Amino acid sequence: MLDKNGIAQRIAKEVKNGYYVNLGIGIPTLVANFVRDDIEVEFQSENGILGMGPFPFEGEEDADLINAGKQTITALPGASFFDSSMSFSMIRGQHVDLTILGAMEVAQNGDIANWKIPGKMVKGMGGAMDLVASAENIIVAMMHTNKKGESKLLKQCSLPLTGVGCVTKIVTNLAVLEIKDNAFYLVERAPGVSVEDIKQATEGTLIIDGEVPEMQL
Amino acid sequence: MINKKVANVSEALQGIQDNMTLMLGGFGLCGIPENAISELVKLNIKGLTCISNNAGVDDFGLGLLLQKRQIKKMISSYVGENDEFERQMLSGELDVELVPQGTLAERCKAAQSGFPAFYTPAGYGTEVAEGKETRAFNGKMYVLEEAFKADFAFVKAWKGDEAGNLIFKGTARNFNPSMCGAATITVAEVEELVPAGTLDPNQIHIPGIFVQRIFQGADYEKRIEQRTVRQKA
């Protein structure tokens, strides 16, 4: 089974040379730590920077330089700043190559819910609705089950939707899965996790086609 | 040169009244019009509808207006950092309209640019699209979203000149440029106000035509919401 860093490490393998990548808050943010050094990648943060770098050294924080999680960051050589409208032109106009974000629920038809729990948590969708409605290449990073142990990979989402039919790939602490033909296809198992474990933790239709390899990290 | 300079924040807010709709720039606490917000608190203007990506934190930014119950309605994309906001929303004291972030920016930009509405894919098939016109273009579904209408836009820039030209710094730019000229009156506050002719015209982000009043803020706290650092190896 993977921890959050393990999920990020597996997703980092999906990041290709020349990609512009938008990372969501939480596990997706960790992906930047695992991207290979020998490829060129630029990270976009939707509050208005392309070419985002690591956190600043102590004493070098700049209140005018933050990411979408409101954390202080740095700008790498070749970085640019822009306004919110242009930032979402990059996203809506499909200029960003890969979007990685978290989710509370994903359904086998590709629906995603990650912004609201009625009566409990209403923080807002931020940029998530724009991202999932526009991006062609979306990877969801999440734990396979919630804190109560219930599956987050469902036949149908129970929470208010963020987007419809938009997710094609999911990396969890247990598995890598792809969505097609209204089902979850099991692609890889996390180290030490059996197909049976994944079946138990998946409420939606799970397709197992032949031998399922263990992830290489 | 058409001079947009006003003496101070008090002059900049002339004409502000209860129940108006305001746009306020900023992302979190980054690039917010601190001086205009302080003045709104001081004047105790009530019943405001505020269009702003976030609602500040409990004791800074728009949180200061929420503490004094000056806001009737918030139009935002993300409001997760404010306990008083959550309390007022769940008790029904505060009306909240949540808008996808890109749609929020574009509804400002549409008002600035003279477009009454636009189609976006964001929110299609979700509760955000309920009651709105939808339409297919090239096989993909889109939602019709309308331009905002506001009485005042309060924006914050790094530098400005007396002609109202603005230059922003870092990610403090965010929603500020799209709000310029998107309301009846745009008030820009800057950290440094210089005479016309001082700024390089090649470097201007927002031309003065979109700004009615400009002043140099008396003070900027520029509070950091999430201070994250790494250690030197």
Image (cartoon, rainbow, N blue to C red):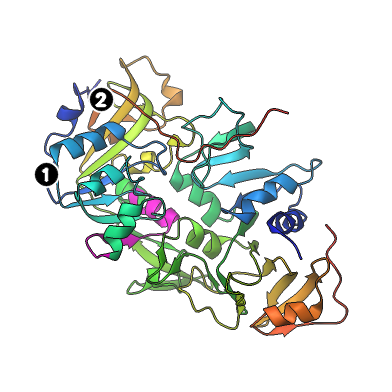
The three-letter code of the residue at mark 1 reads: Gln
Q: In which quarter of the image is the N terminus of chain A?
A: bottom right
**Vertical relation: A208 (above or below) A169:** below
Q: Can residue B94 be seen in this view?
A: yes
Q: What residue type is labelled 2?
A: Phe
Return the mark for residue A138.
Answer: none
In the visual, does B138 lie left or right of B94? Answer: right
| Quarter occupied by the C terminus of chain A | bottom right
Q: Name the residue under label 1.
A: B17
Q: What stretch is highlighted in magenta?
A: B91-108
Q: Name the residue under label 2.
A: B215
- Please tell me whether residue A182 belongs to the stretch shown in magenta: no
Give the chain letter at badge 1.
Answer: B
Residue A54 lies, in percent from the top left, at 64, 37
- Residue at image coords 50%, 29%: A62
With B198 as the anchor, is A211 left or right in this view?
right
